[in-house]
């Protein structure tokens, strides 16, 4: 069924309560400069973007990609410390009795504090060349997974609700309609990627379906917070900054609940009481740490 047919069969009368959306990422590798350009051009904050590529991340990704499809060779982490990140290219052999033997053929070295360029004792080895080519490209390029994380982060900032168990289809409340359409513009500038948006208007069926999904999302967030606080009470974290962040998370959850209630009249039983109780626990930890 085409998107236009879906839209034509949806009721458009009544209050706009939000938008249903899904996305497709295609040809989504993109340079950092280009990603910032399309993001800012759409009027979105760069705070929603992933961290810029780093030599370490580029090397790890290059190794994963170069390993795919290799027969009889492995690329294994050999060393990781503050000075170096070293991978070894290893030939794997199996004899008729099922015995395995390994022979190292090359080292790939990233000297963290010296240079972003890779070193190797066998620079002409096919796998070393494959890793280097990918690494040099990835030094300034975001992967499709980076783009996906930026989308998920932006949707989270829009109080989006997942409508499928494993993601992929979301509902964004109406107050964030402008941000969603800015995101749609940005994604359209990334290769052949796209976000499809279907406006949802107030009907009893829509309110019930979206309300159930929103309530479930709130209850899941609350359960996760409760579990974390229980762990804190048993073993308080040493990092003081962790606790105020949890207080901020409580405030965000309250704001999300208020938004869902205003749009869909969604209520979660005893949500405020549970959040108040958890807040008191965290504040108690803060006071105990300060004394």
Image (cartoon, rainbow, N blue to C red):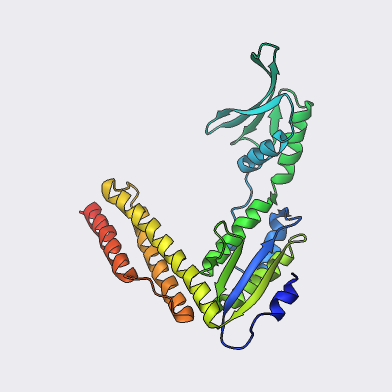
236 left or right, relative to 74: left
Q: Nearer the viewer, residue 185 or 45?
A: 185
Give the quarter of the image for residue 200.
bottom right
Residue 50 in the image: above or below residue 253: above
214 left or right, relative to 279: right
Residue 150 in the image: above or below residue 119: below
Whether residue 41 appears in this view of the structure is no
Quarter of the figure that contains the C terminus: bottom left
Task: Tell me residue 30's x, y (percent).
Answer: 72, 55
Task: Tell me residue 252's x, y (percent).
Answer: 42, 67
- For the view shown, which residue lies furthest in the top direction? 97
Whether residue 200 appears in this view of the structure is yes
Give the quarter of the image for residue 56.
top right
Give the quarter of the image for residue 194.
bottom right
Quarter of the figure that contains the N terminus: bottom right
Q: Which residue occupies 65% across, 72% down?
A: 182
Task: Tell me residue 83's x, y (percent).
Answer: 55, 32
Q: Which residue occupies 32% across, 66% down?
A: 275
Q: How many marks?
A: 0
Task: Tell me residue 24's x, y (percent).
Answer: 70, 61
8 left or right, relative to 289: right
197 left or right, relative to 156: right
- For the view shown, which residue lies furthest in the bottom direction? 13
Residue 111 in the image: above or below residue 136: above
Q: Which residue occupies 67% across, 63% down?
A: 23
Q: Which residue occupies 27% across, 51% down?
A: 233
């Amino acid at each position: 069924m085409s998107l236009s047919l879906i839209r034509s069969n949806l009721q458009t009368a009544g209050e706009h309560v939000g938008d249903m959306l899904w996305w497709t990422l295609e040809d989504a590798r993109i340079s950092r400069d280009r990603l910032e350009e399309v993001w800012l051009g759409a009027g979105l904050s760069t705070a929603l973007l992933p961290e810029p590529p780093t030599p370490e991340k580029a090397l790890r990704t290059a190794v994963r990609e170069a390993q795919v499809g290799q027969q009889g060779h492995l690329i294994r982490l050999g060393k990781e410390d503050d000075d170096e990140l070293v991978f070894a290219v290893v030939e794997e052999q199996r004899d008729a009795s099922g015995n395995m033997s390994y022979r190292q053929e090359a080292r790939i070295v990233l000297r963290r504090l010296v240079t972003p360029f890779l070193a190797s004792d066998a620079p002409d080895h096919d796998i070393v060349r494959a890793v280097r080519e990918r690494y040099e490209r990835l030094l300034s390029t975001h992967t499709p997974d980076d783009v996906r994380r930026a989308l998920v982060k932006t949707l989270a900032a829009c109080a989006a609700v997942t409508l499928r168990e494993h993601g992929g289809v979301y509902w964004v409340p109406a107050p964030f309609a402008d941000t969603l359409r800015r995101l749609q513009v940005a994604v359209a500038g990334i290769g052949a990627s796209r976000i499809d948006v279907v406006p949802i208007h107030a009907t009893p069926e829509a309110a019930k379906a979206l309300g159930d999904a929103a309530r479930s999302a709130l209850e899941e967030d609350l359960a996760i917070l409760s579990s974390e606080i229980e762990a804190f009470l048993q073993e308080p974290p040493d990092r003081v900054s962790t606790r105020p962040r949890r207080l901020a998370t409580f405030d965000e959850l309250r704001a999300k609940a208020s938004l869902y209630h205003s749009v869909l009249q969604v209520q979660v039983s005893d949500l405020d009481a549970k959040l108040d109780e958890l807040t008191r626990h965290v504040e108690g930890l803060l006071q105990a740490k300060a004394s």
